[in-house]
């Protein structure tokens, strides 16, 4: 029995014995994220996601190890790709589980906000193209491994200081290895509303990798315009009923036009199709929208249109999009766009909490809080 | 003739084989590493796990994952599992599989009730940690069930007449 206990103790490495916690980055329903570095070995920077430990005497009866930790770690464990945040280690101490991951200095949201509020100029075409290509590369890898990310948005696209994209936050991700398996789950929704695909907005139970590609299309558009392309007002959930997102659908058809039957033959089969009658008719205005952003590449417009196809079956896949002529035309995408163009952004702002070891150097506040609809109000979904 | 099969079937089959190879134990189930366990304990435990899975109306995949976790735990753990703790570890595997696969996982006390208090909540909580450490968090590993789904879907496409009538032998 003594032997038993000793072996167990070995498994429980205290997180702070192994890592120096430099500062607190952000928090959500799952727990808190910290910046850290290992106490031994090369001086690299890491991110540590600490899942909320279960507190004794909580109203809900204890379910042991957190379900969101099992989901997220279980998925990330098999993923190794240069454009996906790497899970380096899982550390369990006393009550909490920690994911030790690659650290990225920026995320796409903070970079775009810095351009909007401080630089007051758009992202260069080289940067847009390089980020988009790497994002597609990461998403193509997830899809090839039968994983849907289900929450792609600028805040979840991590970017290193040289400009390498790392798709992060797999908290809502799901494997889809069994064809025909429904991914629908009662009162739960997936994807932050501005980036949510039309088939999801119309209540589809069976959805595919195309939902991630819609989000990528929205992110591409947002990089071009520095504002969300479909910034709909979210209808809040009431009485555990998923509401119809009228405002969001309206924003989409204002730009892309009312979907015609030949554009999306199965639209009439969507559970919430009847809601489509309440909108007035719009013509497709994406070309005008694109021209107004000041971008001229016809190939860029074609690529954007192919990712914002209404019909999920016709929407471009990530691997097809990577082969698009847009990426063959000058400027060609590069791996380290910030390095190449000598761009630097203010570093991530850190604060301190009781877990932190040291006082971080003061950084100017990078951006005011945005009014982004978060996915933090989304419950764990299956 | 494969031309009617969606291309994802091929890709999925290939992917499942590749991932399975990394973790598969073959016919080994790890019982032999634990001198105090006898080989007949595994079927008894699996029978009981099947019963629990029926009561919870669990998806088939969840049961298959549970048994796979159990075998891989027994094959990889540094701990010596005593007979009195085997059911506790089996339940921990079930609890983890439910968290990975089902919408909701039952509470620890529900699970101890199910086992008629053969172990305590704290023991179960510790067992979950022991299992996850032994599995090294590799939880999304293909199961027999996933291969069977694939085989039947292929067969249904290739021999539609045989699968048209579910009552036909």
Image (cartoon, rainbow, N blue to C red):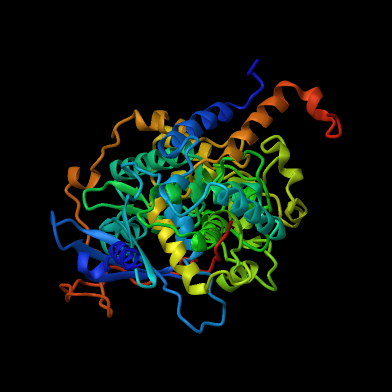
Left or right: residue A139 versus residue A192 is left
Q: Is residue A380 shown above or below A81?
A: below
Could you say where residue A287 lies in the image, as x and y percent from the top left? Answer: 51, 41
Q: Can residue A298 be seen from the camera position used here?
A: no
The one nearer the camera, B60 or B157, is B60
**Residue A371 position within the rendered picture, expressed as x and y whole percent measured from the top left:** 45, 69
Q: Is residue A279 left or right of residue A138?
A: right
The image quadrant that residue A1 belongs to is: bottom left
Q: Choose top left, top right, bottom left or bottom right for residue A356.
A: bottom left
Q: In the picture, which quadrant includes the C terminus of chain A?
A: bottom right
Tell me: B140 left or right of B117. left
B146 left or right of A93 in image: right
- Residue placed most toward the observer, A280 or B52: B52
Q: Taking B2 as reference, is B152 above or below it?
A: below
Relative image position of residue A238 (x, y in whole percent): 67, 72
- Residue found at the far bottom of this picture: A57
Q: Residue at x 53, y 44 (%)?
A: A286
Viewer-nearest residue: A219 or A251:
A219
């Amino acid at each position: 029995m003594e032997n038993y206990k000793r072996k167990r103790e070995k498994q429980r490495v205290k997180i702070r014995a192994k890592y120096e916690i430099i500062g607190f980055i952000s928090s959500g329903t799952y727990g808190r994220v910290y910046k850290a570095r290992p106490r031994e070995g090369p001086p690299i920077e890491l991110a540590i996601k600490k899942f909320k430990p279960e507190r004794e005497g909580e109203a809900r009866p204890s379910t042991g190890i957190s379900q969101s930790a099992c989901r997220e770690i279980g998925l990330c464990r098999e993923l190794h790709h240069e454009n996906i945040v790497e899970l380096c280690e899982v550390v369990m101490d006393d009550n909490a589980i920690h994911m030790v991951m690659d650290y990225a200095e920026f995320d796409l949201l903070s970079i775009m906000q810095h351009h909007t509020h401080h630089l007051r100029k758009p992202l260069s075409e080289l940067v847009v193209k390089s980020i988009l290509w790497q994002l597609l590369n990461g998403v193509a890898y997830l899809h090839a491994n039968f994983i849907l990310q289900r929450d792609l948005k600028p805040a979840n696209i991590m970017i290193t200081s040289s400009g390498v994209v790392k798709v992060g936050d797999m908290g809502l991700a799901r494997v889809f290895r069994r064809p025909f398996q429904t991914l629908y789950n009662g009162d739960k929704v997936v994807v932050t509303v501005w980036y949510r695909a039309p088939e999801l907005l119309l209540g589809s139970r069976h959805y595919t990798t195309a939902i991630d590609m819609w989000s990528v299309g929205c992110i591409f558009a947002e990089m071009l315009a520095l504002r969300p392309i479909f910034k709909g007002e979210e209808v809040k959930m009431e009485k555990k009923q998923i509401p119809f997102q009228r405002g969001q659908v309206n924003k989409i058809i204002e730009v892309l036009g009312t979907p015609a039957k030949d554009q999306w033959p199965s639209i009439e089969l969507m559970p919430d199709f009847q809601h489509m009658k309440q909108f007035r008719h719009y013509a497709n205005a994406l070309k005008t929208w694109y021209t107004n952003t000041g971008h001229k590449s016809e190939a860029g417009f074609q690529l954007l249109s192919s990712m914002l196809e209404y019909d999920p079956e016709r929407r471009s896949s990530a691997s097809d999009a990577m082969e698009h002529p847009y990426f063959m035309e000058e400027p060609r995408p590069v791996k380290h766009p910030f390095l190449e163009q000598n761009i630097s952004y203010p570093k991530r702002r850190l604060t301190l909490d009781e877990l932190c070891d040291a006082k971080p150097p003061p950084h100017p506040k990078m951006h005011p809080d945005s009014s982004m609809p978060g996915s933090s109000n989304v419950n764990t979904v299956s | 003739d494969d031309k009617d099969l969606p291309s994802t079937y091929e890709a999925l089959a290939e992917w499942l084989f590749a991932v399975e190879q990394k973790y598969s134990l073959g016919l080994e189930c790890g019982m032999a590493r634990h001198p105090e366990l006898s080989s007949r304990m595994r079927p008894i435990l699996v029978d009981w796990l099947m019963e629990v899975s029926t009561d919870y109306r669990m998806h088939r995949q969840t049961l298959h994952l549970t048994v796979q976790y159990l075998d891989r735990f027994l094959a990889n753990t540094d701990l010596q599992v005593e007979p009195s703790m085997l059911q506790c570890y089996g339940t921990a595997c079930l609890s983890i599989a439910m968290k990975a696969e089902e919408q909701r996982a039952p509470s620890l006390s529900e699970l101890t009730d199910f086992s008629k208090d053969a172990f305590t909540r704290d023991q179960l909580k510790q067992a979950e940690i022991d299992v996850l450490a032994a599995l090294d968090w590799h939880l999304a590993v293909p199961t027999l069930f996933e291969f069977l789904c694939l085989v039947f879907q292929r067969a249904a496409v290739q021999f539609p007449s045989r699968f048209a009538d579910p009552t036909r032998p």
